[in-house]
Image (cartoon, rainbow, N blue to C red):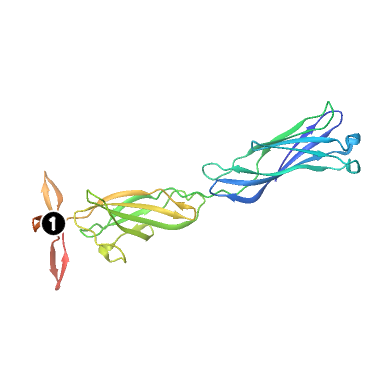
Amino acid sequence: MAVSEGQLNGARDYRARIDIWYSGVQDWGGNRSRFDWRVELIDAASWGSWTNATCEVWASIGGVGYYGTFTIPSNTAGQNRVVLTGSTWIGHDAQGYRPGFASDAYIKVPHSNIGEGGSGQAWVDAPRIPKPPTAPRNLRVENKTPISAGVRYDGPADWRGSTSQGYTAEWYEINGSNNPLVWRDQNSRGYTDPQGGAVAGAPQLKPGTTYHVYVYARSNVGNSPATSIALTTDAGGRVRVNGQWRNATPWIKVNGAWRRVRPYVKQAGTFRTVR
């Protein structure tokens, strides 16, 4: 709880006290927390003959204004009293933290010389509102073959107060037209690899074909931005061009149309794909 007090001076002295506390309620979607507060008139014993008169009170909580009136019955003239209460939603910053906010109160009684106010900063603790994590980092290609490849990556630098719920890796085939999604790996944990189709639901990749792999982290409040990497599977053969070896993909003409083919070799009685 934060407390702000101001001395009110006039023909008689009294003080306005503002109590502010975190209510325990947050609006994650609105990035804000609710704070409850009250304005109290204290040191009121000297009020004497001002009983039963209508007094005014103003408060500003984090820039939100409030107004009310109150009276002091003669039989309670010497007692402190709460004269205004309310609840105010205070926003958090972009990282989910809540900065301090200003508050002040002003009380006016029906007397020509009285009408002062008190003000202060409220530094009330409220939990951080979690945000989606930052993107996974340091993607690199491993275990590349003509029909498979793997991508290893590091987790987000900052989960931003959220709770990890795993990773998703999406594999897109880049074929110059519709670039289809060929695999969504929901069980990725730092490494994603279709293993030539051996992983349940994963495809066998095509030789000499480019794929874009997008990886994002999942959390209890949403997904991170995606980080991507491009890779090209090894072709079924290689050809030397200008002094450098490059992937070569064999094609065959079938019914007037050229189609990609994959070379095989028989090993121990079983045909296997080769470069």
Which quadrant, please, contains the C terminus? bottom left
Residue at 91% x, 43% y is: 75
Residue at 16% x, 62% y is: 274
Question: Percent position (x, y) of residue 51?
Answer: 88, 37
In the image, taking residue 189 as reference, residue 177 lies left or right, namely left
Residue type highlighted by circle 1:
Arg
Residue at 22% x, 55% y is: 233
Check disc 1 and report the residue beneath it.
Answer: 259
In the image, taking residue 31 as reference, residue 268 lies left or right, namely left
Q: Is residue 191 above or below residue 266?
A: above
In the image, taking residue 180 as reference, residue 108 lies left or right, namely right
Question: Can residue 172 be seen in the rendering of this structure?
Answer: yes
Question: Can residue 20 be seen in the rendering of this structure?
Answer: no
Callout 1: SS: strand
Question: Percent position (x, y) of residue 78?
Answer: 89, 41
Question: Percent position (x, y) of residue 40?
Answer: 78, 41
Q: In which quarter of the image is residue 259?
A: bottom left
